[in-house]
Amino acid sequence: MSVQDKVAVITGGSSGIGKAAAIELVKQGANVVINGRREQALVEAANEIDPTGTHVAYVAGDISDPQIAERLIGEALSRFGRIDTLVNNAGIFIAKPFTDFTEADFESVLSINVAGFFQVTQRALTEMLKAGSGHIVNITASGTTEQPLKAVPSVLAALTKGGLNAATKSLAIEYADKGIRVNAVAPGITKTPMHSVVETHDFLAKLHPMGRMGEAQDIVDAIVYLESAQFVTGEILHVDGGQNAGQW
């Protein structure tokens, strides 16, 4: 199914997977509204996504803030008239031993990974229900949630991204008869600004059975597939170089 003229809202859209997804969707004929916390980064991303400004809009701010979530959905409706797809990509990852996590770590990860998801998804779903159609894609995680790695202790990622995997199935069942599909992409460790230290890439590559890190385009390809897969809902699509398959 073509994405021509569809309207997609993408959180965490100023860099990495979110920006790459926006570039691809616009290339295929969609309109996108991106969100991120830093306005200048959003301006630069929007110019890269569509230099004409015709097919892209942005809203800066913390997506866990209900007012920012309201503005983001409102911008999609006022600029492009509807919302067909929501890509919940905004997220934070902190790896450290469990007893080293601080209250600030806990609050930050839950705010972005969970509260942000809740605020924007509830509002997007309200609009999708009015239209009788829609698609939500949650970007979760693979190894840290379903095949934990001793070398990368990250229980807050397991708690929050694992929770989003469960929420994906719950929402898929709740809204399957309303014309709304809900899926997830569970990436392995992907080359994005979150993992920008090149010296760590060899170590991170070895954490995947295929022996390499993921590329942003690998995740984008999965998003595009799910967008076209009209009989797929409640799916957690692992794009992780084999991490989820088991130990190696």
Image: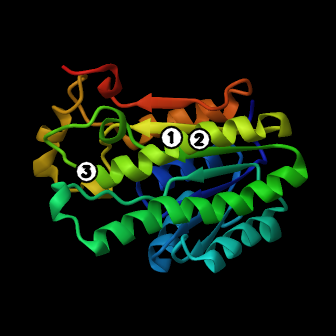
Q: Which mark is residue 168?
A: 2
Q: Amino acid at mark 3?
A: Ser
Q: How is the image coloured?
A: rainbow
Q: Position of residue 102 (x, y in %)?
A: 23, 71
Residue underneath mark 3:
154
Give the structural element (helix, strand or loop) at label 3: loop
Image height of 96 relative to 142, above or below: below
Label count reads 3
What label sits on residue 12 in the rendered view?
A: none
Mark 2 and mark 1 in contact (Cβ < 8 Å)? Answer: yes
Residue 206 or residue 130, whichever sits in front:
130
The residue lying toward the viewer, choosing from 122 and 87, is 122
**Image position, residue 197 (x, y; %):** 17, 56
Residue 135, percent from left and from top: 71, 43
Residue 93 in view (yes/no): yes
Q: Residue at x 28, y 50 (%)?
A: 155
- Between disc 3 and disc 2, whose residue precedes? 3
Residue 7 placement, left or right of 24: right
Contact, mark 3 vs mark 2 (Cβ under 8 Å): no
Above or below, comparing residue 40 to residue 96 in the picture = below
Residue at which label 1 appears: 165
